[in-house]
Amino acid sequence: MSTFQAPKGTYDLIPPDSAKYLAVREAIAAPLRNSGYGYIETPGFESVELFARGVGESTDIVTKEMYAFETKGGDKLALRPEGTASVLRAALEANLHKAGNLPVKLWYSGSYYRYERPQKGRYRHFSQVGAEAIGAEDPALDAELIILADQAYRSLGLSNFRILLNSLGDKECRPVYRAALQDFLRGLDLDEDTLRRAEINPLRVLDDKRESVQKQLGDAPLLRDYLCDACKAYHEEVRELITAAGVAFEDDPKLVRGLDYYTRTTFEFVHDGLGSQSAVGGGGRYDGLSEMIGGPALPSVGWALGVDRTVLALEAEGVELQLPSSTSVFAVPLGEDARRVLFAKVTELRKVGIAADFSYGSKGLKGAMKNANRSGARYTIVAGERDLAEGVVQLKDMESGEQAAVGVNEIVAELEARLG
């Protein structure tokens, strides 16, 4: 037993389970790479002020969940709690929006950190794949991102997820709704913290998960009844484009995301097999975020999908991913001469793209063959002094059990032909 353990609310990705996480990341990223999104990677920590401005000072993320610290030099930094603010900051800093090709389409994958009460599906360290389309106001862009996320989930074999869709309006119509909602909330029996939040950002109260709050919100005014004509038309086009693509969704007039920067289109992917932590991903349009963090007006839209929760959703549906074996060929040398010869052949196999492993540690035949079985290799190469004297190795098919002698100099070509 090690003296140390992973911090509370975190987890280690360990083989063979880690292969599922890699497969999920790849499946989410594949449609993005096929749709003009380039990869971006940002630091694991940023200025506290970036998230305070972008995510919102009234959000739980900033007030309660952010890992913030001060460096020896006096800089106030925070481990990144989400990806959008960091990606937009990086795009602005690199002047990607000035290259003349808008929108700037970016995707990312990484770890994020929030100080929350740990439970299944909610961790203090978690993994996401995200996508951002920066610098264009177009319903087709909102629809594209929703469709790509749907495509990614279905490519994994997921089917029991739902897409919730809403519009949060814009700077023209949302202030009117905001005032109406505040009037409504002031008449409820809410604690002081919630009433304070209602004055800063009343939409955040709608996102409160406590039953004592939710049961009072039944008659709350709905934003859809306050949308201006432009926002109504925009939202209707998003709905039409998604429907035409064959992607099912549910209108949810009470859906608000937990970040302050969202405008107009907002959406969430939920899976009913995950209990209370049912959201597996979500996103929306954030037309004013660039200006909030000191940039020019750059209407943008994006999403982030949780890798951890997607894996849990796959398990809830009983979906087994078809993962390729990490090893196709396993070499078992018997004696020092065979050790040198087979090590060279393993190196050759790897150079031509065949996944190959080697029996290290001078094990006997029985122990080495156990390792070969555990590796999942389709073929095992075995060679001893007598084999080498005859210029051959023994090639064993681990599925059929058939074994044949193959020339030492022909073994790489033979395995290339068999493995295709």
Image: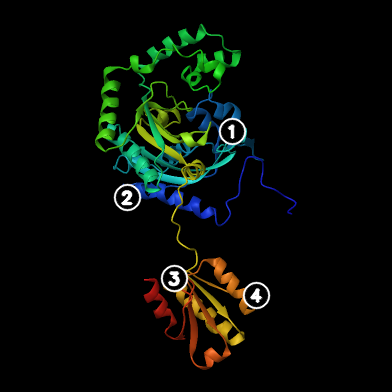
Whichever of labels 3 and 1 marks the residue nearer the N terminus, that label is 1
Q: Residue furthest top?
A: 187
**Along the line of sight, the residue nearer the viewer: 193 or 217:** 217
Secondary structure beneath label 2: loop
Labels 2, 4: front one: 4
Disc number placed over residue 34 in the picture, else none: 2
Question: Alpha-carbon distance for marks 4 and 1?
Answer: 47 Å
Whichever of labels 4 and 1 marks the residue nearer the N terminus, that label is 1
Instruction: Please say if the residues under marks 4 and 1 sit with CB atoms less than 8 Å apart.
Output: no
Q: How many marks?
A: 4
Image quarter where the N terminus lies is bottom right
Secondary structure beneath label 1: loop
**Measuring 58% from the left and 26% from the top, which residue is drawn there?**
63
Secondary structure beneath label 3: loop
Secondary structure beneath label 4: loop
Whichever of labels 2 and 4 marks the residue nearer the N terminus, that label is 2
Residue underneath mark 4: 361
Display colour scheme: rainbow
Q: Amino acid at mark 2?
A: Asn
Question: Alpha-carbon distance for marks 4 and 3?
Answer: 22 Å
| 352 w.r.t. 156: above or below | below
* Residue 143: % across, % down: 30, 35
Residue underneath mark 3: 354
Q: Amino acid at mark 3?
A: Ile
Whichever of labels 2 and 3 marks the residue nearer the N terminus, that label is 2
Q: Is residue 393 left or right of residue 224?
A: right
**Measuring 59% from the left and 33% from the top, which residue is drawn there?**
66
Question: Quadrant location of residue 242?
Answer: top left
- Local packing at callout 1 (Cα closer than 10 Å; few below 14, some 14-19, many 20+) is many
* Residue 219: % across, % down: 44, 11
Q: Is residue 328 left or right of residue 240?
A: right
Question: Alpha-carbon distance for marks 2 and 3?
Answer: 26 Å
